[in-house]
Amino acid sequence: MNRRGFLRVATGGAVGATLLQAEACRMPFGKDQAKERSSAAAVAREEIATTCDMCVNKCSVIAIVEKGVLKKLNPNPESPKSRGMLCARGNAGIQQLYDSSRIKHPMIRTGERGEGKWKVVSWDEALDFTAQKLSAVKEKYGPQGTLWSSSEGWQEIFFRNLSQAFGSPNTVRHSSTCLTSVNLAYSMTFGTVPSFDVQNARYMIISGANRLESFITPDTMDLVDATTERKARLIYLDPRFTKTAAKADEWYAIRPGTDLAFILAMMNVIIGENRYDKNFVSAYCTGFEQLAEHVKQYSPEWAAEETQIPAKDIVRIAREFSDATPRAFYYAGRRSSWYRDDFSMRRGQAILNAIVGNWDREGGLVPNAKVELGELMFLPWDDPVAPRIDEIDKNFPLAAKSDGVYPKLRENVLAGQPYPVKGWMVYKQDPMNAVPDQEKTLQMLRQMDFVGVIDVQMSDTAWFADVILPESTYLERLDPVEMLGGIRPVVLYRQPVVKPVHDTKPALEIVQGLAKRLNLSQYFDYTMEQWIAEQVKALPLDLPLEHLKKHGVYSPPQFPKYGTTLSPDHRFVTKSGKIELFSERLQESGYDPLPVYHAPSQVPQGKFRLVLGRHAFYTHASTANYSWLHDFAPENALWLHPRAADSLGIRSGDRIEVASGAGSIQTKARVTPQIRPDCVFMQHGFGKRSPWLRLANSGGSDAEIIETAWDKVSGGAALHETFVKVRKV
Ligand SMILES: Nc1nc2c(c(=O)[nH]1)N[C@H]1C(S)=C(S)[C@@H](COP(=O)(O)OP(=O)(O)OC[C@H]3O[C@@H](n4cnc5c(=O)[nH]c(N)nc54)[C@H](O)[C@@H]3O)O[C@H]1N2
Ligand SMILES: Nc1nc2c(c(=O)[nH]1)N[C@H]1C(S)=C(S)[C@@H](COP(=O)(O)OP(=O)(O)OC[C@H]3O[C@@H](n4cnc5c(=O)[nH]c(N)nc54)[C@H](O)[C@@H]3O)O[C@H]1N2
Ligand code: SF4
Ligand SMILES: [Mo]
């Protein structure tokens, strides 16, 4: 992306980026660094290519380092994934490194859990303590008595491998609070989860995927270009007027939980008017007859009642969409943890995309291309013997086993069913804020004999732990090489740009330290350098490692490639080998083989539906304590429609209480017509309990008030199924 393009993203929230770059020069230095700095007459300057880890997107970065001190993070235009963009959070990565409230040493709790009394210990002490506690749990309850939870990270694999070598079947990832329903729905339809060719599309329909604030690269930058240059028409559905809505051609404040009605009615029109792609459907799809019969019941007039989108608009959009295909799509979105019927809604989208024949076409849905990486071979361990605590096979037979299902898992741990789980290791995750109904997560923490957390800051979960093992930040460590599939696949490199500022270690070393004490060293008998050397061997470059060290990214030139799956003998990874409009596998597992609409529950009198989302300056619950970001948007005020506010005597800025069946929080009101009167909205990531995250203590935590609910098929959390009462305090 050119500079003009980057500044345009500013409308979506990256406005702070340039200011932050200027501010970077004023960062706080440690005493030693300051001394070192002033004594150096000529400052050695290095530019080091690496990869951002301030969120899941992995943008390519160039770190400007002077005399061992990180001065600035710049975007690296070489990556086709980040296209020369570095957002406000990416710029603020410097603060993660030099944050004065970072966890600087390993620590063991001395007071009660959550009392905040810690003693600083050596790594040997911390690792001895952790290994002893894990062994004690294993002795009493078996290896299945331990839970290992983690979120996406390039060293996450070592943590997960340790859990398996230890013998526990109980791993759980962030996925089941994020995207399991959308991934499962597209996999059940196409046998894979594709990318969306935003750059080349001419018509896009997006349901509540707020790309101009919730960044997914390169979609965010491509969407900015597409809408600014009016290359494509954007239809955006969201109960709230987001920054993405502001860029759209049409915004519909859809009634929450009714998107599937809109989608089914679109299919009703497209099939009824013979606007589907007959050749594509007959060559590549199965179950069209059943689908055609099924959608007859879902007329635009019916959908208009459900969605509150006029029938004439649904008909027109269906026609425009089918006219624009194949350069048209219904965008999948990422966080699909919304409702109990998330899976059906996402499957509806996938089927709608399939019947207009936009699969594997320029401007449509494109299966992700990959670059092969090599793998280091290590000794295999025995598979765990015990079944999983969340009984995923029984409860959600189609869900991804190793990701687990968080809400059900917590319910079973609390019930001690089918067996007790008493030890919990957490890596790069903050379940206190990421799993709905915080009080229950707290209960789960409290019933553990042992809790160990590997983090970079004192998260709310770390605050309640027994031991904290501080990881070196992404700017201080060497990570495994990562391949990201996509329309243009990339291989990314993350290397240390400065030495560790504090007494921290990368996850591999923490895992190896624990493995040694647990007599599992034989499974971790390698160095990071050896791991990487095996990975890069497979790359088609003369000096692959040298290339990555210098450029930070490798992007093979032969992409994009369209139509690689469009040959009659191509087998999709589904039961039938075809794109499945009707799914026998779903039917066999006891689910609807075609998406059936279930109306959402009505908003009770005097209450509002709580919907959530992100702000462009914040990553989940993890960046609100960084002042460069926090100063721009210091609290997560509750959005409330003026009519609703009037009826409650609330004005913007008033302190209010927001209460649900799970709990209550206090924050400020933001009275705005940019939300439906029957909904309230709040941003995730505030109202922290941990006193170390002083700035993030402001506002309220959505996790405290969201009630427990999950999607029926994927078991993923349903975060928009809570109704709240609001009052002025
Ligand atoms: N209430 C509520 N819950 C949600 C959501 C919501 O909107 N509201 N969103 C859902 C979604 S989409 C997702 S993806 C999940 C995300 O849930 P999490 O994966 O828990 O995400 P974060 O809140 O970013 O917490 C990540 C933790 O990792 C730490 N961390 C950051 N960098 C490093 C590192 O390099 N090493 C280590 N060891 N730790 C690090 C951070 O300090 C933080 O404590 O939450 C889900 N849950
Ligand atoms: N800045 C920033 N960017 C991020 C992240 C971050 O933390 N910060 N996290 C990354 C991750 S892990 C994820 S999963 C993605 C999440 O990105 P998105 O998938 O865009 O999710 P949210 O930002 O949570 O926004 C959800 C939107 O859905 C709307 N909505 C609620 N109910 C309905 C409904 O029934 N119908 C419709 N049509 N809309 C509805 C909400 O009002 C809200 O605007 O963002 C990624 N990018
Ligand atoms: S979107 Fe921002 S925070 Fe996320 S990886 Fe890119 S620059 Fe970093
Ligand atoms: Mo997510």
Image: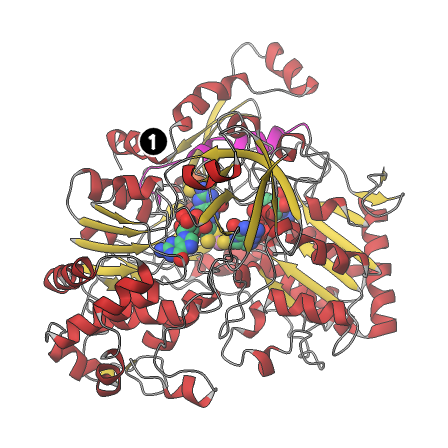
Return the x and y of residue 712 as percentages of the image width and height.
50, 74
Where is residue 642 shown, x and y percent of the image?
42, 37
Where residue 488 sits, quadrant-wise, is: bottom left
What amino acid is labelled 1 in the image?
Ala
Highlighted magenta segment, given as a residue range: 82-100
The one of 524 and 222 positioned closer to us in this rendering = 222
Residue at 61% x, 52% y: name it.
660
Q: Is residue 70 visible?
A: yes
Location of residue 138 by image quarter? bottom right
Where, quadrant-wise, is the N terminus in this rendering? top left
Determine whether, in the image, residue 408 is placed left or right of residue 245.
Answer: right
The answer, for residue 478, to whether it is visible in the render is no
In this rendered view, identify the residue nearer to me: 239 or 346. Answer: 239
Q: Quadrant of residue 538?
A: bottom left
Inspect the magenta stretch and tell me whether residue 340 lies in it.
no
Q: Is residue 537 left or right of residue 625?
A: left
- The spot of residue 586 in percent (x, y) is 42, 84
